[in-house]
Amino acid sequence: MAFDALHLARAQFAFTMSFHFIFPAFSIGLASYLAVLEGLWLKTSNTLYLDLFRYWVKIFAVVFGMGVVSGIVMSYQFGTNWSAYSNRAGPIIGPLMAYEVLTAFFLEAGFLGVMLFGMTKVGKGLHFFATCMVAFGTLVSATWIISVNSWMQTPAGFAVAANGQFVPADSWWPIIFSASFPYRLVHTVIAAYLTTALTVGGVGAWHLLKDKADPYARKMFSMAMWMAALVAPVQILAGDQHGLNTLEHQPIKVLAMEGDFDPSPDGAPLVLFGFPNERDATVHDRIAIPHVGSLILRHDAHAPLAGLTDYPRERWPPVPVVFWSFRIMVGLGLLMLSLGLWSLLARARKRLYDWRLLHRAALLMSPAGYIAVVAGWVTTEVGRQPYTVYGELLTADSLSPLAAPAIATSLVVFALVYFTVFGIGAGYIVRMMARLPTPQELEPPHIPQHAAGITPASAVDHMVPPAGVP
Amino acid sequence: MSFDLTTVWVLIIAFAILAYVVMDGFDLGIGILFPTLPVGPERDHAMNAIAPVWDGNETWLVLGGGGLLAAFPLAYSIILPATYPPMIAMLLGLLFRGVAFEFRWRDPAHRPYWDAAFTLGSFVAAFSQGITLGAILQGIKVVNGAYAGGWLDWLSPFTVLTGVSLVLGYALLGSTWLIWKTAGSGQAHARRLAMRLAIGTVAAMAAVSIATPYLHYDYWRRWFSMPNVLFTAQVPLLVIITAAIFVWGLRRGAERLPFLMTLALFLLNFIGLGISMFPYLVPRAVTIWDAAAPPASQKFMLVGVAVIMPVIIAYTGWAYWVFRGKADTHGYH
């Protein structure tokens, strides 16, 4: 059971998708951060901001490239592993994904090259415009792909054709702007911003631990902590709204997240901890606060809430996975909020740059965003099970007609290649982060840049001669 | 209306695939030929000859795949599972090739490893693409609108032949691109390679062309029945003429003609493929009209393609124009 074609295909998709997601989660936030840094430099003429811009833009180049490489795989995974789904949902999701790809190309062809290599070639204003367009482009790309995902979660605006395909009913608007789309988009984009803030803050903290007087480390850390302090509460609010929306459209998912097997006619408790067991339909060793669950989900302590047992078992998602991934995400979110509040306290006490424990905590928290993003994605995607298109198309009916050994082999090869390639990439990025920005920080090296579309002329004029190293 | 729209989409996707094959073909070809180049300036010149354009070339692959999903979801959902292993191998090959290309510069301490990964990735991607093409041509078992074969059906002597053919063809593209874009010893080396590869490529093309009509009677009828043969016979005739011009140009020391003639060979192959396949996307099982997404989907996406594709083409053209000179150790002149 555990190793049939369906589970292997799901494992493979989850694996390749999780790897892919990590890169845009960073590059979406980083692109906006770069636009802010360049904007501040233009406004204040303080070269500190320019040095920071050049420092982070080099990291951005590598991260963006990895995102594109892993994304190309995704655009074919739908067909290789989920061909039945691709055929039936293709008329709806195909054009939306095509728009994502076209937007990304547009961005690559037009602006990324200028942003990376053009600072000395075009005027400051034009360069800033290119940076803003790159940031905007990452957001547009995210909008399209979140639209696809939201339609799968809360499908709308479709009809089912005679051949079983989902086709647009009349207008694209209800398809693109499905019920969960605005909530999901806001929650995801803020997650990307928080992830970036924690990474930038972690790098700042790392260097503050080595030299608390360094102006670059101070600036990075301060900016990142402002972001964490301001955005973490907003994110919790956005998550709450997203949860209410999910309760309305996918109540079973929320009940699995909460671990509510039994209905609660007089208000649901908030389960903090426990071990959900689907067979017994109970949460073992449960620690719960009475009525708080209803207070959060219905904004009324005594509002009744259904339980999973009100629904047929074959419509339950894998409850323990959703229960735990949700707790990991929320737990990390609360830690992020705490870090932000701690930084405000440190600021008030004028100890932001010499409170070593705070710096250690920030360093420890630097990967928290990636874990939270993947955990959140697992919550929403596993919570959508047993469907690919919620309520309409079962995952089991979405699978390609493939033999298990074929998927098992490719899964092993994917794992080997991804850990090697992205392991080296991540190691390279960490080495870049280990170095402090310097005054007159250099421009990005003029080397072939993956995903910069066509490396612009300005780059190759100065291409680093690949000296005769064997 | 839906006929027109569907035909437009076939043309768009055919264009994207052809654009991919000829543009990424020479990148992959240089990757395949890389071990034959001596370490040092010749390798660096070869790398610099593709550095400015290689990534943009891959764009077309994503556009072709994404377009197929959106405009012909049924064909996408049959072809990809039917060619699962070569498809996955191609993706991983391209991933390896891409990262190796970039990190060759970023991480010069491990350059020999990156170069080896570059070659391996290029070879695997090219061979897999050739196999995939052969697998589609030899026929895919379809029952009730879904792939109904096993996971190794794609493997046959014919698909191995098409795989080898495409590797040779890409290597030929790569060598003739080097003739155009480099000078000196690298160019001389590329010339020697090009002659051998041209012989190999034309022989492989002939073998595939001879084998194809035997795959199925339908192919035979398309090529050899009257009056079709009056038209189809032009294709092998043009291949012979193109090959003759190629040899003449190479002997005469022409720098661009060999590459342009290789492009012509690929174009003729593509036309031949069209003759064999049209109007099927999956031979003898799914026509373009069977596979077409509803007009609402094709129309919606056409708007975006109509706006953005010209931009991509213009930008690509501009980049090739900028880098029209010879490449050397320091990039382009």
Image (spheres, coloured by chain):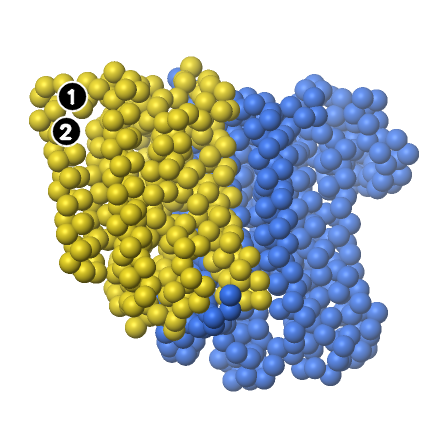
Chain colours: A blue, B yellow
Q: Give the label on residue A412, or none.
A: none
Taking the spot 21% from the left edge, 35% from the top edge, the residue there is B271
| Picture quarter with the N terminus of chain A | top right
The CA span between labels 1 and 2 is 8 Å
- Determine the image quadrant of residue A52: bottom right
Instruction: Point out the tag, 1 or 2, that comes first from the N-terminus.
Output: 1
Which of B269/A428 is in front? B269
Q: Is residue A138 visible?
A: no
From the top left corner, tell me how far across and down residue A332 is, in percent: 75, 52
Taking the spot 50% from the left edge, 37% from the top edge, the residue there is B88
Position of B133 relative to A55 (above/below): above
Position of A273 relative to A445 (above/below): above
Callout 1, which amino acid? Phe
Which residue matches tag 1? B224
Q: Residues within 10 Å of mark 2 (few under 14, many from 20)?
A: some
From the top left corner, tell me how far across and down residue A298 is, in percent: 72, 38
From the top left corner, tell me how far across and down residue A437 is, in percent: 62, 77
Contact, CB < 8 Å: mark 1 with mark 2?
A: yes
Position of A204 relative to A372 (above/below): below
Which of A388/A172 is in front? A388
- Determine the image quadrant of residue B141: top left
Which residue matches tag 2? B232
Q: Secondary structure at mark 2?
A: helix
Taking the spot 22% from the left edge, 32% from the top edge, the residue there is B272
Which of A208/B82 is in front? B82
Q: How many marks?
A: 2
- Determine the image quadrant of residue A165: top left
Which of A154/A48 is in front? A48
Q: Secondary structure at mark 1?
A: helix
